Image: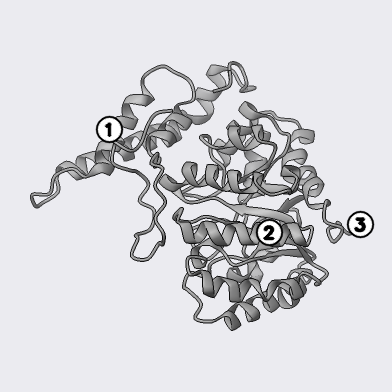
Amino acid sequence: MNDVTQTCPLTRGQVMAMYFLEHRARLLDLAAFLDRLDRTCGQESADFREQALYQAIHLLSDGQPHRTARILALLSDCTDELPQSAEGMKGALGAVPLTTGDSE
Amino acid sequence: MKYIDPHIHMVSRTTDDYQRMALAGCVAVTEPAFWAGFDRSSAQGFFDYFRQLTEYEPRRAAQAGIQHFTWLCINPKEADDPAFARDVIALIPEFLKCDTVLGIGEIGLNKNTRNEQIILEEQIALAETHNQLVLVHTPHLEDKRKGTRLIMDALQASNIDPGRILIDHVEEHTVGEVLDRGFWAGMTLYPDTKMTPQRAADVIEMYGSERIWMNSAGDWGCSDPLAVPKAQQEMRRRGHSNELIDQVTYSNPQKFLSQSPRFHIAKS
């Protein structure tokens, strides 16, 4: 991945002032979503999307660049198989079981 | 500030949207043929759709002072039945003679199937035979990276210059490879999926402003026909120059699209 150091024209303080509140709100939305999952009824276990989400959250705080690209890669199909037809297939779900995604 | 929205499905939008886009600075749109939200039952349905794109929609856009151009194809979502898709492809050459048709699009893959791939290759051949520009749809969400690579491999197996092909719906995990392989890249600004105006501005900062554009891809789903001027505003508030903003929202689309002799912006 390319070196993106100092490509944003704003200072750290300017970015924080401009974007902190909207991302604070999104962080709280994410926390509330996870709380909601914890409060669900029934006996279903976590599916692959929930597992992928927690994996992605680890990437957020690893201090490395290109978090967005790495999270998108984690959520991507990395298999080589091509089915003949889409007959009976569901629409895109936004994540894959962790054995087929990666963090390239 | 004037702009071009080079990918928007105006057949799904209201006349109010044309008026609001004109007020926001839109001077031209290009509309790729796409999935209508349901599968059409016959090739005749596509014949009517192609007439709507080439005859009716340019007139409706003109009422708001916006120029309307189009792209024709069978979209990847309905291309999974090769026999049906070939009936639709057979209609296209006659429509390529229309004054506002810029090329073949949006072709690509949806669920990365062999059937979709066969029809993608046949439509690439159609573009090559008729010397047309190509606008490419890349798959959604988890299917995007794999599909984008498959599509680029198929395109590079043809003799079409990558500089005459735009790969659309790029995100952070695909944009670098698209540009490195010589294609143009399109960023689609959607509220929930694909790219926000903020992320699009980030990509411009990280990957540069050459061979890249932004579009709303506004359609019948959750989308925003004013997404491009909102991205202009996002870049403006970060302090980017009007020259850079103009490049990615007007000059770059004009440069790519002008490779078709049919595309020209009327002087106001």
Residue B127 at x, y percent in the picture: 72, 59
Q: Are marks 2 and 1 in contact (CB under 8 Å)?
A: no
Tell me, yes or no, whether dots 1 and 3 are on the same chain: no
Tell me, yes or no, whether dots 3 and 2 are on the same chain: yes
Q: Mark 2 points at which residue?
A: B125
Q: In which quarter of the image is residue B187?
A: top right
Q: Residue furthest left?
A: A43
Residue B261 lies, with reference to residue B158, above or below; the image says: below
Q: Can residue A14 be seen in this view?
A: yes
**Residue in front for this viewpoint, A103 or A100:** A100
SS at mark 2 in the image: helix
Residue ID at (50%, 68%): B78
SS at mark 1 in the image: helix
Residue ID at (38%, 25%): A60
Q: In which quarter of the image is residue A91?
A: bottom left
Label 3 sits on what residue type? Lys
